[in-house]
Amino acid sequence: MNSLLKKVIKDYIPSDHSKQVSIDYYLKSVLKIQESSQYQKVLDLGCGQGNSLKDFTELNDKIDWYGIDIEKSPEVLSRAETNERFMTFDGINIPFEKGYFDLIYCRQVFEHVKNPRELLKEVNRVLKPGGYFIGSTSHLEPFHSYSYWNYTPFGFSVLLEEAKLKLIELRPGIDSITLILRRGIKSRKLFKIFWRIESPLNFLISVTGKLFRISQSTLNAVKLNLCGQFIFFVTKNE
């Protein structure tokens, strides 16, 4: 079950467990780390409909939340709420000063970003030293909502390094086979549960790992190699 992927991203593969996670896995831990801050500035990069606003304010009512997206994405056009917290940009230049945000949150956005290198440099610019950048993006996911790219976990780690951002961990999200079937069957409701529990291929890998006593880091590498989406936990050096 070992893989080349494990070798090239070994520094970012956790060994504590190999469960499938979502971006929320890191969100709560980051907010706990930063709870000593009197006021936290958060940017939802690629906020779409703005659903994270409610999630953040429920977790911490002191959070100063901003959402930003391009003007005419399908998700923005279907947004019900608009206020001064929702902003538009050109897909590259984030209209905030250097080191403004404690946390940048980015759920399934970078596969839709036309210029990822340039945007990651902007993430570095507007993130405070010691701040966090957490998110998820596509690996082996079918085309959706005008997506441009699918990233390998290794390829995304290289982009982060080029932007001078420090990758801490990568973890597997929902598996690729489930996402392919979801796209083919065209039923979102049928597959929605697999964002809350382990998706079928990930579950099979977990069972196999338990039977053969395979290490958690190796299981994470296998799941990352076959995932439809992966989760990243990044910081900016002091």
Image: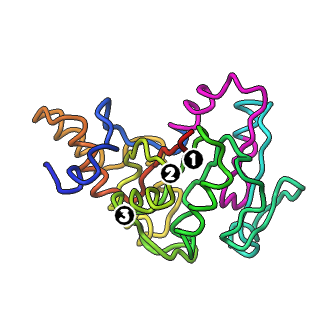
Residue at the spot 38% in from the left edge and 67% down from the top edge:
180
In this rendering, which labeled residue sits more in front, label 2 or label 1?
Answer: 2
The residue type indicated by label 1 comes to Phe
Magenta residues span 25-54
Graded by Cα atoms within 10 Å as few (under 14), some (14 to 19) or many (20 or more), the crowding at tag 1 reads many
Between the residue at mark 2 and the residue at mark 1, the CA separation in whole angstroms equals: 9 Å
Q: Which label was assigned to residue 155?
A: 3
Q: Which label was assigned to residue 165?
A: 2
Determine which quarter of the picture holds residue 56: top right
In this rendering, which labeled residue sits more in front, label 3 or label 2?
Answer: 2
Which quarter of the figure is the C terminus placed in? top right
Q: How is the image coloured?
A: rainbow
Q: Which of disc 1 and disc 3 is earlier in sequence?
A: 1
Q: Which label was assigned to residue 9?
A: none
Instruction: Examine the rendered structure and indicate whether residue 16 appears above or below residue 234.
Output: above
Residue 118: horizontal and vertical position, in percent?
A: 58, 69
Instruction: Examine the rendered structure and indicate whether residue 15 appears above or below residue 125.
Output: above
Q: Which label was assigned to residue 133?
A: 1
SS type, badge 2: loop
Q: Residue furthest right?
A: 84
SS type, badge 1: strand
Determine which quarter of the picture holds residue 175: bottom left
Residue at the spot 89% in from the left edge and 55% down from the top edge:
84
Instruction: Examine the rendered structure and indicate whether residue 25 appears above or below residue 113.
Output: above
Residue 167: horizontal and vertical position, in percent?
A: 44, 47
